[in-house]
Image (cartoon, rainbow, N blue to C red):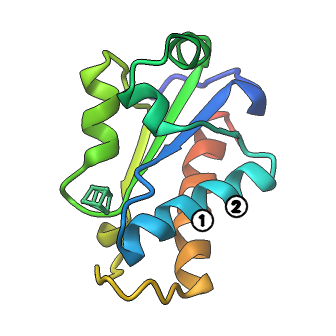
Amino acid sequence: MEERCLCEPNEIIIFSCAGSSNVGQIANQAAIKLAQGGVGRYFCLAGIGGHVSGMIESTKAGKMLIAIDGCPVACGKKTLEHCGFNIDEYVQVTDLGIEKNHHFDLDPMHVGKVADHLAARISKRRGG
Ligand code: SF4
């Protein structure tokens, strides 16, 4: 059985790849939506990639790590794992049936789909 996380939203840290494609930007917008909805805090993935010590330490202090990648290249996951972090919940936008393109014409329904998917997974982990 999966262990429940007794963490508070401010201890839930969200990263997105924020990549230069529709799915990368959907990942970014979904992370923003989760943060605005009080689900967790959205941190800068570039700070992890850049080994910025304060950001590494703040991330270590978190109790649940969430990562959103746009596509199977999985840049966010690889960046976090490269720095030794274990991801608790992870999704690739393309796994939710959203096709990658470089038009940047984001569909708000797609953003909602990714955010809702993760909010449900996080809630389940917290025993909700
Ligand atoms: S995971 Fe995909 S969308 Fe995200 S930065 Fe990498 S290549 Fe771009």
Q: Is mark 1 on a helix, strand or loop?
A: helix
Q: Is mark 2 on a helix, strand or loop?
A: helix
Q: Position of residue 63 (x, y in %)?
A: 60, 19
Q: In which quarter of the image is residue 116?
A: bottom right
44 up-or-down from 36: above or below: above
Q: Position of residue 107 (x, y in %)?
A: 55, 88
Mark number, residue 29? 1
Q: Quadrant of residue 11?
A: top right
Q: Quadrant of residue 98?
A: bottom left
- Is disc 1 in contact with disc 2, using a CB cutoff of under 8 Å? yes
Seen in the image, is 7 located left or right of residue 5? right
Mark number, residue 4? none
Seen in the image, is 27 located left or right of residue 77? right
Q: Is residue 1 visible in this depiction of the protein?
A: no
- The answer as to whether callout 1 falls within 8 Å of ligand 1 is no
Seen in the image, is 108 located left or right of residue 33? left
Quadrant hosting ligand 1: bottom left
Nearest to the observer: residue 119 or residue 1: 119
50 up-or-down from 91: above or below: above
Residue at x 67%, y 35% (from the top left corner): 127
- Which amino acid, mark 2? Lys
Q: Where is residue 22 in the image (x, y as percent from the top left)?
A: 40, 77
Q: Position of residue 77 (x, y in %)?
A: 31, 39
Q: Which residue position is annotated with label 2?
A: 33
- Which amino acid, mark 1? Gln
